[in-house]
Structures are given as structure tokens and as C-alpha cells.
Image (cartoon, rainbow, N blue to C red):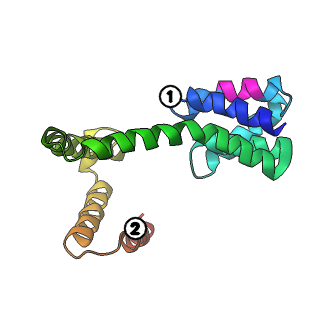
């Protein structure tokens, strides 16, 4: 049983491009193929995995492994699903470590910084004002921007620990909203 869990989730880990939600059908197929969970129990397991912190595919693998074979099953399934990604990251990191001092590589990474920063700012504004730019005129949104600016200044200028900034922002959010 442990070997089945490991191999099944290893296969899923190798093809898990596109995120955890993309592999849910494969996880369901393997779970029902080996009789680890009923369709109803699988649905409950994936719901619980989605509410838990962390990647849904890894959480699903851990829960299914545990339900199928206890702690050993959880370990086997989790190891199987994360092993391909771990190996790939180690290989890529060792490759970049070797070419890190190359001036062209350094220049490329410095050139990517403003693009990444722009993408993050766009995502923050896009999700922050999901109802459109006209919602920017609402007073509550100005308050959100003010809290965000204060958090940025606290971290950059005053070197405040990020956890304190998050906690402070949460308190301000609860006070004003």
C-alpha cells in the first residue's frame, strides 16, 4: 500500500504543471482506482485540503495517504508528490549557481527586477480594486492605500519587522472596517 501511494503520487508530481487544482482529477482517478477513498469522501478531503494552508495537491496527498495507510501513508504520498519538484529545483539551483557570476546572467536578472515589480504592483491594484478603477474614488479605498503606504514606509525607512507591520495593518483594518 505504501509503495502504491508513493508511486501514484510520484507520477502525479511529475505532471503537476499548472498548479494543484490542475491535478485534482488525476488524484481523484488514482484514489478511486486503488479504492483509497469513495467519491464523497474524496470531495470532503479536497475541500479540507483547499482550506488548509499550503498547496492543495500536497495537502490532498497527505490527507489521502493518511486515510489510506496512516502516518506512513501520509509520508509516502507527500514524499511522492513533492519529490519531482524538489529534484527539479535542486537541479536548476545548481545550474544557476554555476553561471551566477556570468555578467550576462547578472544583467538579465537585474533587468527582470523592474518587470517583476511592475507585475506585482499590477496584481495588487487589480485585485485590490476588483470592481474597477471607479472604486478608487471611495473613501474606504483611500484608507486602504494609506495603510499600504504606511506599511511600506515602516518596512523600508524604519526597518520594522514585517510581522509587526502585518499585525499593525490588521489592527488598523479591524478598527476602520
Residue 27 lies in the magenta stretch: yes
Of residues 116 and 120, the one nearer the viewer is 116
Residue extending furthest toward the front: 98
Spatial CA span between label 2 and label 1: 31 Å
Residue 43 in sight in this render: yes
Q: Mark 2 falls on what kind of element? A: helix
Q: Position of residue 78 (x, y in %)?
A: 67, 44
Residue 75 — which label? none
Magenta region, residue range: 25-30
State which mark lies toward you, 2 or 1. Answer: 1
Q: How many marks?
A: 2
Question: Which residue is located at x 38 percent, y 44 percent?
Answer: 93
- Quarter of the image that includes the N terminus: top right
Residue 17 — which label? 1
Position of residue 38 in the picture relative to residue 10 (left or right): right
Q: Up-down: is 11 above or below 115?
A: above
Position of residue 96 in the picture relative to residue 118 (left or right): right
Of residues 21 and 9, the one nearer the viewer is 9
Q: Up-down: is 133 above or below 7?
A: below
Quarter of the rendering containing residue 49: top right
Q: Position of residue 114 (x, y in %)?
A: 17, 44
Q: Mark 1 falls on what kind of element? A: loop
The residue under label 2 is 166
- Quarter of the image that includes the C terminus: bottom left
Amino acid at each position: 500500500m505504501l509503495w502504491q501511494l508513493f508511486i501514484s503520487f510520484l507520477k502525479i508530481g511529475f505532471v503537476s504543471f499548472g498548479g494543484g487544482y490542475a491535478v485534482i482529477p488525476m488524484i481523484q482517478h488514482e484514489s478511486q482506482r486503488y479504492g483509497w477513498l469513495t467519491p464523497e469522501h474524496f470531495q470532503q478531503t479536497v475541500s479540507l485540503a483547499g482550506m488548509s494552508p499550503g498547496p492543495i495537491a500536497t495537502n490532498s496527498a497527505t490527507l489521502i495517504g493518511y486515510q489510506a495507510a496512516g502516518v506512513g501513508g501520509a509520508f509516502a504520498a507527500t514524499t511522492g508528490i513533492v519529490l519531482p519538484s524538489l529534484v527539479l529545483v535542486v537541479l536548476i539551483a545548481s545550474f544557476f549557481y554555476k553561471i551566477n557570476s556570468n555578467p550576462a546572467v547578472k544583467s538579465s536578472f537585474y533587468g527582470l527586477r523592474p518587470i517583476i515589480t511592475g507585475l506585482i504592483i499590477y496584481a495588487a491594484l487589480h485585485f485590490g480594486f476588483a470592481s474597477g478603477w471607479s472604486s478608487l474614488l471611495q473613501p474606504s479605498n483611500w484608507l486602504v492605500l494609506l495603510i499600504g503606504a504606511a506599511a511600506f514606509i515602516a518596512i523600508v525607512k524604519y526597518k520594522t519587522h514585517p510581522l509587526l507591520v502585518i499585525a499593525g495593518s490588521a489592527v488598523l483594518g479591524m478598527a476602520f472596517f
